[in-house]
Amino acid sequence: MSVHRCPAGKPSLVTEPMHLRGIALPSEEAVEFWVRDGLLTDEPVPGATTVVDGGWLLPGLVDAHTHPGAEQPGDPLDADLLRRHGREHLAAGVTLLRVPGSADRLPSWYGTEPDQPDVVSAGRWLGLPGMFYEGWARHVGEAELAGAAVQEALASGGWCKIYADWVVDEGGLDGPHLPADRLAEATRRVHAAGGRVAVHTQTAEGARAAVEAGVDSVEHGLGLELDLLDRMAAQRTALVPTFTVWRTFEQVARASRSTRFRDWFRAAHARLGPLVSAAYEAGVTVLAGTDSYGTAVLPHGRVSGEVHHLAAAPMPVAAAIGAASWTARCFLGFPCLEPGAPAEVVAYGHDPRADPGVLGHPARIVHRGRLVR
């Protein structure tokens, strides 16, 4: 694989016409694209610079569950951190983020600057009092939830994020649960307004309420029961298991004062892989999301690690990669590698299906028709 060399340091924002040639995934076809005015075309463009000549081409990577802009619970949204976290994602080939909840609604400029990924946001986290961290969530009463969900969806990227439950570790386990009828009402109202609903759930009760409400995505889903998978597939409710964050919770469990919490977490964590495997086999859309916050423990730009966990669930390697690329882009309404689509391409010298670890080291990144690397 030969590539056009760019100076090291600040990302290059090449805007002149480009030429790429390689094997496209998931089609496995040899393709040749040119980039003109930020779009892919299969018609030769005179004077285009060849930036990729051989190797494997993927649609831009996606982290479908990440939280840029603040690192510690209760911290306000920080513009400098937003930019830094976005650059960390983009440097790893992640050209699209879904941000299901943030300390405040994301500013309108976020996701539009040249060195930032595209962004689908969900406004502020929504939950009953006692759910999630003070200062980060928008806490509302049961009667106000549906209206607040519509507000957040309309004020953001068309999504809202609702807490169906909240597992606590203060010498116990059980936190507040959102009544199923309230979640169903909020989901109906958001769908009627043209929005989509993501739901945080860790318990069996919360997962059942989410699926029966017809939400668009179940985030985490530790307690999700197998009898719900066929319904999820039929109504196109996606599962975003966020293995990455749960891998960090083992030390939390060890330090917990509650034997009940430790036992619950270890059992729930142990069943997550088989659950994801069963979900995939049932036809559920499984997406890759890291739940990253930009801390040393949960850095941004590590969706390749989430793909590794999905493949180990097990899922077919190609499906695990798709969960962080073409499958996620389709679910979120973004095109892939096709003439007329925005040029969002990551290129690799080796087949990532043979070694998913290469996903974290793209040879070339094209974002909005610009050569980032």
Image (cartoon, rainbow, N blue to C red):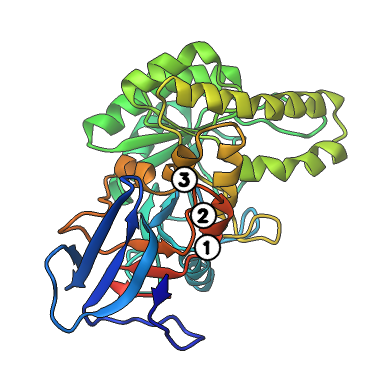
Q: Mark 3 points at which residue?
A: 321
Residue nearer the viewer, 358 or 370: 358
Foreground label between 3 and 2: 3
Q: Mark 1 points at which residue?
A: 69
Query: Dot 3, crowdedness within 10 Å: few (<14), some or many (≥20)?
Result: many
C-alpha separation, residue under disc 3 versus residue under disc 2: 30 Å
First of labels 3, 2 by sequence position: 2
Q: Where is residue 208 in the image (x, y as percent from the top left)?
A: 50, 17
First of labels 1, 2 by sequence position: 1
C-alpha separation, residue under disc 1 versus residue under disc 3: 26 Å
| Numbered mark located on residue 103 in the image | 2
Residue name at image x 80 percent, y 36 percent: 253
Q: Where is residue 345 in the image (x, y as percent from the top left)?
A: 34, 62
SS for callout 3? helix
Relative side of 42 to 228, left or right: left
Residue 328, by quadrant, is top left
Q: Compared with residue 299, is residue 28 higher up or lower down, i.e. above or below?
A: above
Residue extending farthest top: 227
Tell me the kind of residue under disc 1.
Answer: Gly
Tell me the kind of residue under disc 2.
Answer: Ala
Relative side of 351 to 213, left or right: right
